[in-house]
């Protein structure tokens, strides 16, 4: 299982009369990890929803080899509080994968917590359970919408390291929405910055570092600087900061 080939071809999205995205094209090869960055409201989650088939593009199309099995981690864990973790995972899980639930929880550091309910978990544990729920379907398209966004920096750093490890062990074509340039450089093969009005692709950057990656490795510094520069230029008026 290495994931689907994914192509956004000239995607445009409108909500009513508002044009949210225009002319967004990108390619993610099987098992590739594309980080999406851009100002709040620039349409990153919308692009994820287009990839998942939850939002209809008004222009262009998404091309995959076959309809992908999608694992989606939202900004908050969205676990059903009255169900145990095992039941939360079983809800999305095809019957043939149900036996994998305890091992998948163990994979994200929740061994033995199968019968806990979400209210018994910390925020970081709940987010890891949400990652397990996305992985248990053996996704060939994994959509991560700010998976560490709601966490304190130490817990976020732990989850980032775990995600890096998980994606090496269970590759899936992945779209990672983040506001954190370090997270993008740590996890992604390529960074795509959305910007402008309406939003388009403001820039891309390949992250060609060996794995596993250490976020404190000085080799990441020039890349971090480039990502920050792309972000700054993404919303600069035409001709400024180019
Ligand atoms: N279902 C919807 N109906 C109407 N407008 C929407 C809908 N979903 C999103 N929008 C609008 O589309 C724009 C892009 O939203 P989106 O959530 O994709 O941005 P984002 O880059 O993910 O933001 P953030 O970083 O804050 O999560 C916003 O202006 C938002 O209000």
Image (spheres, helix red, strand yellow):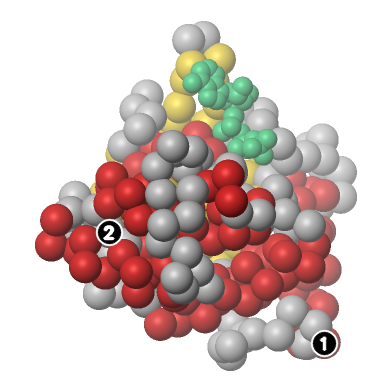
Task: Give the Cα distance between marks 1 and 2.
Answer: 36 Å
Q: Is residue 198 above or below residue 192?
A: above
Q: Residue 137 shows which numbered tag? A: 2
Name the residue at 73% across, 40% down: 39
The reply to whether the C-beta atoms of the residues labelled 1 and 2 are less than 8 Å apart is: no
User: Would residue 176 be found to the left or right of residue 31 on screen?
Assistant: right
**Upstream in the sequence, badge 1 or badge 2?**
2
Q: Quadrant of the N terminus?
A: bottom left
Which of these two is toward me, 225 or 35? Answer: 35
- Give the answer, above or below, for where 14 lies relative to 204: above
Q: Look at the image and tell me whether residue 92 can be seen.
A: yes
The residue wearing badge 1 is 218
Instruction: Answer few, some or many: residues within 10 Å of disc 1's Cα (few below 14, many 20 plus, some between 14 and 19).
Output: few
Ligand 1 lies under 8 Å from the Cβ of mark 2: no
Q: Residue at x 82, y 35 (%)?
A: 237
Residue 139 visible in this rendered orientation of the protein: no
> Toward which corner of the image does residue 182 lie, by quadrant?
bottom right
Residue 57: x and y in percent read: 37, 29
12 on left or right of 36: left
Q: Residue at x 76, y 51 (%)?
A: 231
Secondary structure at numbered mark 1: helix
Which quadrant of the render holds ligand 1? top right
């Amino acid at each position: 299982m290495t994931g689907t080939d994914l192509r956004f071809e000239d995607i445009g999205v409108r909500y009513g009369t508002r044009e949210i995205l225009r002319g967004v094209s990108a390619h993610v090869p099987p098992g590739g990890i594309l980080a999406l960055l851009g100002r709040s409201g620039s349409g990153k989650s919308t692009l994820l929803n287009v990839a998942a088939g939850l939002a209809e593009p008004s222009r262009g199309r998404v091309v995959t080899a076959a309809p992908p099995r999608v694992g989606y981690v939202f900004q908050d864990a969205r676990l059903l509080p009255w169900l145990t973790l095992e039941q939360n995972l079983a809800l999305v899980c095809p019957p043939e994968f149900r036996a994998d639930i305890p091992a998948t929880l163990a994979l994200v550091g929740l061994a033995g917590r199968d019968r806990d309910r979400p209210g018994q978990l910390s925020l970081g544990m709940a987010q890891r359970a949400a990652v397990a729920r996305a992985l248990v379907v053996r996704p060939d398209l994994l959509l991560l919408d700010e998976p560490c966004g709601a966490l304190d920096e130490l817990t976020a750093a732990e989850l980032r390291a775990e995600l890096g490890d998980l994606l090496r062990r269970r590759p899936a074509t992945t779209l990672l929405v983040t506001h954190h340039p370090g997270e993008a450089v740590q996890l992604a093969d390529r960074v795509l910055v959305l910007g402008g009005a309406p939003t388009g692709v403001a820039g891309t950057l390949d992250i060609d570092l060996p794995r596993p990656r250490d976020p404190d490795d000085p080799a990441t510094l020039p890349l971090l600087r480039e990502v920050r520069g792309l972000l700054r230029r993404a919303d600069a008026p035409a001709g400024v900061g180019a």
